Image: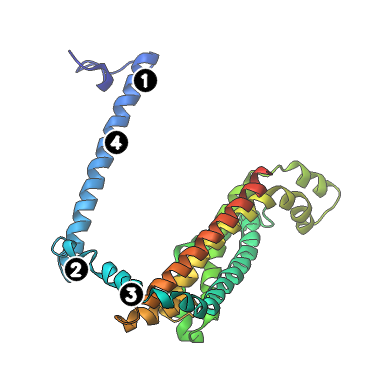
Amino acid sequence: MVDAAFGPEPGRRPNLADPREAYLDMIRRKRMYGGILLVVFVALMASGWRLAEDRNAGGFLDGLHQIFAFPLEVLSEAWEKRAVLPGIFLDHIPALIETLNIAAVATLLGGLAAMTLSLLATRGLARWPALIPLFRRLMDALRAIPEIVIALVLIFMLGGGPVPAVIAIALHTGGALGKLFSEVAENADLKPVEGLASVGATWGQRMWLAVLPQVAPNWLSYALLRFEINVRASAILGFVGEGGIGHDLKIAMQWGQGRYDEVVAIFALLFVTIVVIDQISDRYRQKLVQGT
């Protein structure tokens, strides 16, 4: 007896006009495609693991038993010097403020660029419809290049400091938010746009008066979410000489033993900051989108 879930009897093609056989044929195809994808996934994982093991300086499994050795060493030293941790927190507040400033300015600049690119790349709203593919590919390019790659290039051009970090994060933010903003704008009601066009309004007036009021809540929600991401990105860029609290963390880790209390303090300060920003932005995102 043949399991009906896997298809009809051998040698007979399913009658797709029959709803039952069409449904069973769909299930059979989904299982077949799912099995193929599972095999491909396992093969890619196995090959990637083998490649990583061959190129790694040491075997992963050989050093697995030491995975907690370094964290325990760091935490134990920080616990011994726990009395000085509050002072370390205060010492790194200026660097934290610099990190937040980098993220805020980059989010603002990237958001403004994303607004312009998204409107120029949205079907039905674009100022030059023939150039929509060009603006979409531009957003793809900005989104595809990681911030750290852009920052490393800018360091050679501008030197270290917060300016290359702001530019790098702003460019990536423009591409990422531009894609999200464009998807929101595509769902905007075009009747107000058509009404303004009928009375002779310019393209800028139509976007400002008819489109922005509709998309502003979702755009601001996405911008707040992106600000959280950019705080983490600005901290990471500190490792390549871009300033902020990430740079202080890099210096402390390079000194190694004897400065692990500072490493823990910086991690804790950064963690608390991100949690606070996440809670505040989450609250305001709900208000913007749901109106509660």
Find out whether the residues at labels 1 and 2 contact each other: C-beta distance under 8 Å. no
Residue 57 location (% of width, % of height)? 17, 71
Residue hosting label 2? 56
Observer able to see residue 152: no
Element marked by disc 1? helix
Find out whether the residues at labels 4 and 1 contact each other: C-beta distance under 8 Å. no
Between label 1 and label 2, give the one nearer the viewer: 2
How far apart are labels 4 and 2 at the CA level?
32 Å
Left or right of 183, for residue 214: right
Disc marking residue 34: 4
Residue type at the position of mark 4: Gly
Residue type at the position of mark 2: Asn
How far apart are labels 1 and 2 at the CA level?
49 Å
Left or right of 121, for residue 48: left
Left or right of 30, for residue 247: right
Upstream in the sequence, badge 4 or badge 2?
A: 4
Residue hosting label 3? 80
Upstream in the sequence, badge 3 or badge 2?
A: 2
Element marked by disc 3? helix
Left or right of 20, for residue 66: left
Residue type at the position of mark 1: Tyr
Q: How is the image coloured?
A: rainbow
168, above or below 112, in the image:
below
Q: Residues within 10 Å of mark 3 (few under 14, many from 20)?
A: few
Upstream in the sequence, badge 4 or badge 3?
A: 4
Residue 231 location (% of width, % of height)? 52, 67
Disc marking residue 23: 1
The residue under the point 67% across, 57% down is 128
